[in-house]
Image (cartoon, coloured by chain):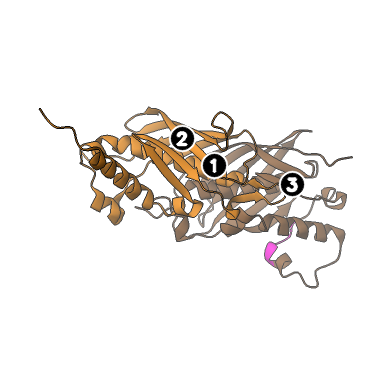
Chain colours: A orange, B brown
Amino acid sequence: MKQPEPVTQVKRRRDLALSVIVSQVPYIKFLGVSFDRHGDELTSTMAFHEDLIGNPMLPALHGGATAAFLEVTAIVGLAWDSLWTDIEEERLNIPAIQNGKLALPKTIDLTVDYLRSGLPRDAYARARVNRSGRRYASVHVEGWQDNRSRLFAQATGHFLMPQRDG
Amino acid sequence: MFWVIKFDIAIKNNSQVQINCLASSAVGPIKESMKENTLDAALKFIEAIPHSRKLGMVVEELGDGRAVISMPYDDSLIGDPVTKVIHGGAVSALMDTAGGAAVVSHPNAGVGTATLDFRIDYMRPATPGQVITATAECYHVTRTVAFIRATACDADTKRPVATATGAFTVMQAPK
């Protein structure tokens, strides 16, 4: 009987793939966004920083920073979903990605719903891919801060999928 | 995003306000009329927003429900590692800022605003290396909601990079 793959090896492979994908996008670093992985589920965190403020008097997060955070979460979530099988079958070409060959989905449109003002603290988000076809995908993202059930923003977007060889 | 600006009635009643930011940031012997002082305060306020500053935004025009804001290209804003195209999120932040600025500069839109809803359509990738300029127009205001539309262009102003529509809150000054 085939032995199951050791857990440390599984985690190392998935975490390496995630960090390689995320590290290719300078803007993710600019915003201070990081990703936590549990199995195939990703949760993004936008660590609070003064540079994210849109209204210094309240203070509150900039709506543009919130929109960008949700868009980044949607794109990485979508890329992660579409690459998952390759990652699991060890077919992900990591050296090519590190050489600037990571083809990411492109945003067609994004609608952001601002539910309450963004507080000056860490924000979290999770994307759900509602439909992913060969060319187009539709993704919903939820963003929250202290309470998972009290969203501060949500977004829906459509994306153009990268055309894969073969 | 939230904005609070102590707007003066003098500027709110003026429908022809349009000042270049570069000229106003040189300040110095600027005319001491209330109109320009208030607009200058609004310009400074917008340019002092930390996230907008971090993105290098510059207010090019402001007044009468219209705002033009530019943002320079920077490698740290790249969203596509293959083409070096700027991330859509940075363009969203630019257009949201322009939308909020258009609302606060509208004669009937109260003293502050926050984004309720913002939809952005990306028509084409912005050319790497070029400045992106967003023009937002606050085209309708009710007692509680302000509606805006915005367009973002790079050097090729004939073909927009993105268009957006948004709904913003209207906060009336306490009586």
Report the residue marked by disc 1: A123
Residue A108 placed where, x, y %?
45, 38
Q: Quadrant of the C terminus of chain A?
A: top left
Vertical placement of residue B170 versus A132, above or below = below
Q: Nearer the viewer, residue B131 or A72?
A: A72
Report the residue marked by disc 2: A126
Classified by dominant secondary structure, the portion drawn in magenta counts as: loop
Q: Nearer the viewer, residue B27 or B135?
A: B27
Stretch of the chain drawn in magenta: B18-22
The alpha-carbon separation of the residues under discs 1 and 3 comes to 27 Å
Res B31 quadrant in image:
bottom right
Identify the subunit bearing mark 3: B
Residue under the image location 28 percent in, 56 percent down? A99
Pair 1/3: label in front: 1
User: Residue at the left extreme?
Assistant: A1
Identify the subunit bearing mark 2: A
Residue under the image location 32 percent in, 50 percent down? A20
Q: Is residue B15 visible?
A: yes
Query: Which amino acid, mark 2?
Result: Arg
User: Residue at the bottom extreme?
Assistant: B29
Q: Is residue B97 left or right of residue B11?
A: left
Residue B55 placed where, x, y %?
56, 57
Residue A1 placed where, x, y %?
10, 27
Q: Is residue B68 magenta?
A: no
Report the residue marked by disc 3: B104
Residue A130 placed where, x, y %?
42, 27
Pair 2/3: label in front: 2
Check disc 2: other Cα within 10 Å, few if <14, some if 14-19, many if 20+. Answer: many
Check disc 3: other Cα within 10 Å, few if <14, some if 14-19, many if 20+. Answer: many
The alpha-carbon separation of the residues under discs 1 and 2 comes to 11 Å
Query: Which amino acid, mark 3?
Result: Val
Specify the label residue B155 is tagged with. none
